[in-house]
Image (spheres, rainbow, N blue to C red):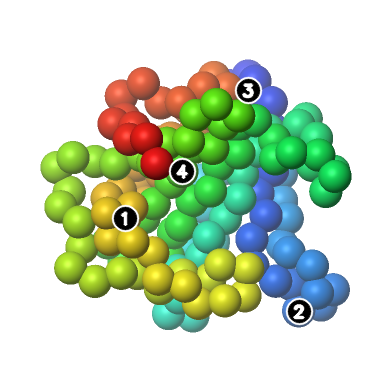
Amino acid sequence: MTTMLAPLRFAWGLNPDDEEQYEVTVATSEELATVLARIHTEALTRGLAQQVDAWAANASTNPEDDLPDPFLQFVVGDRDRASLRWLGADTQLQAVDPELPPLPEPILYDNGGAADPMDPAATRLTLTTVLHILDVFLRQGQRAPDITWVAI
């Protein structure tokens, strides 16, 4: 097992049992892959992609504080495409694969209980690429250097 920098927290959707978001902590690449596959599969089954928030587990998440720095938002659950934003105190970036053209139509995604359209320009990733970006963040605490990042 590889030593990780800090576990990541994920929050998404709405858990009908307690009316709070689903939350989970992942500490290894294997846990990350399993959780991401679960969220993706559940969203495919529902027919609505899912936005997920992610941050280092040791970052403050007090509602009175600013968002953790960095704060990642990603969307999975579409058969072909995904999205990931890196939101830092001084930097707000969208990850893109320049080889993937924008989709002709927006992807609908669950944004905290509302079905919102995702700008096609923001869906220029695959699930595999999102997993790679999150794994680099988990293991190294930084943006994946082999990904194209565009200011938003």
Whether tag 4 and tag 2 are in contact, CB under 8 A, the answer is no
Foreground mark, 3 or 2? Answer: 2
Q: Residue at the location (33% across, 53% down)? A: 122
Q: Which quarter of the image is occupied by the N terminus?
A: top right
Quickly name the residue at label 3: 4
Looking at marks 1 and 3 on the same chain, the residue that comes earlier in the sequence is marked by: 3
Foreground mark, 4 or 2? Answer: 4
Amino acid type for the residue under numbered disc 3: Met
User: Dot 2 lies on which element?
Assistant: loop
Q: Residue at the location (70% across, 71% down)? A: 14
User: Dot 4 lies on which element?
Assistant: strand
Q: Is residue 30 left or right of residue 105?
A: right
Quickly name the residue at label 1: 123
Looking at marks 3 and 4 on the same chain, the residue that comes earlier in the sequence is marked by: 3
Foreground mark, 1 or 2? Answer: 1
Quickly name the residue at label 2: 16
Amino acid type for the residue under numbered disc 1: Thr
Disc ID at residue 114: none
- Give the CA distance from mark 1 to mark 4: 10 Å
Quickly name the residue at label 4: 85
Badge 3 density bin: few <14, some 14–19, many ≥20, Cα 10 Å: some
